[in-house]
Amino acid sequence: NTQENDGRVNIMNLKSNVVTVVPRGARAKFSPEGKHLIFTIRPTHAQQKEAKLKKLKGDKLPKDTLAVMELSTGKIVKFPALKSVENPREGGNFIAFKVEHKETLPDSVVAKADKKSPKPKTEVITLIYNLNANAVSDTLKNVDVISFTKKGDRLLCIEKSKECKKLYVYN
């Protein structure tokens, strides 16, 4: 509903004239090679309104979903609970993004737990997505900062821990 500011992304295949409409789509960008469309899908107006009525704040608010569409096939891969996304400006075949991820406890831990079983902990993980393979190529924990070089040939990650900060460079 446009009155509720939900928005949408329209993608038209110029060869077949087929239009793909993604409700609530926003912030669309083409990959440097132009083979993929990277965009976010916002929570519904109703979800946002409900969160506002419940006076939820910060991490409790509904999150965007990252969507990566392969333009040649129309296939869309989605990653919920998006925190941030980084893509190179001029080249490269990768994107990196942070998402919230709930830790699942192994069955052995759950079996040993008393009646008050521990709640799964939510952590932020960084995923490196290979656009050529259409697959996640690496998963990183405790990453504070992610940034691509201008040409997209390297990804810089700063990992934070209690002891120190580490800089990783991915080629």
Image (tube, rainbow, N blue to C red):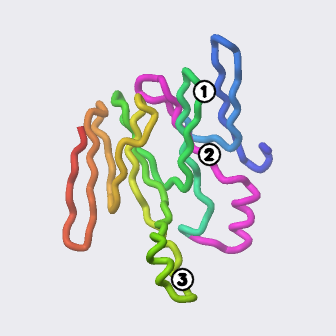
Place of residue 32 in the rendered image (x, y in percent of width and height, measured from the top left): 41, 27
Q: Earlier in the sequence, mark 3 or mark 1?
A: 1
Q: Closer to the camera: disc 3 or disc 1?
A: 3
Nearer-the-camera pick, 108 or 84: 108
Q: Which mark is residue 41?
A: 2
Residue type of the residue flagged with mark 2: Ile
* SS at mark 3 in the image: loop
Q: Earlier in the sequence, mark 2 or mark 3?
A: 2
Would you say residue 48 sits in the magenta stretch? yes
Few, some or many C-alpha atoms within 10 Å of disc 1 (few <14, some 14-19, many ≥20)? Answer: some
Where 80 sits versus 39, above or below?
A: below
**Residue at position x 57%, y 23% from top?**
73
Question: Magenta region: which residues?
Answer: 29-57
Q: Which mark is residue 74?
A: 1
Where 30 sits versus 99, above or below?
A: above
Few, some or many C-alpha atoms within 10 Å of disc 2 (few <14, some 14-19, many ≥20)? Answer: many
Where 33 sits versus 41, above or below?
A: above
Residue type of the residue flagged with mark 1: Gly
Q: Which mark is residue 117?
A: 3
Q: Earlier in the sequence, mark 2 or mark 1?
A: 2
The Cα atoms of the two marked residues, 3 and 1, are separated by 43 Å
Residue type of the residue flagged with mark 3: Ser
The Cα atoms of the two marked residues, 2 and 3, are separated by 33 Å
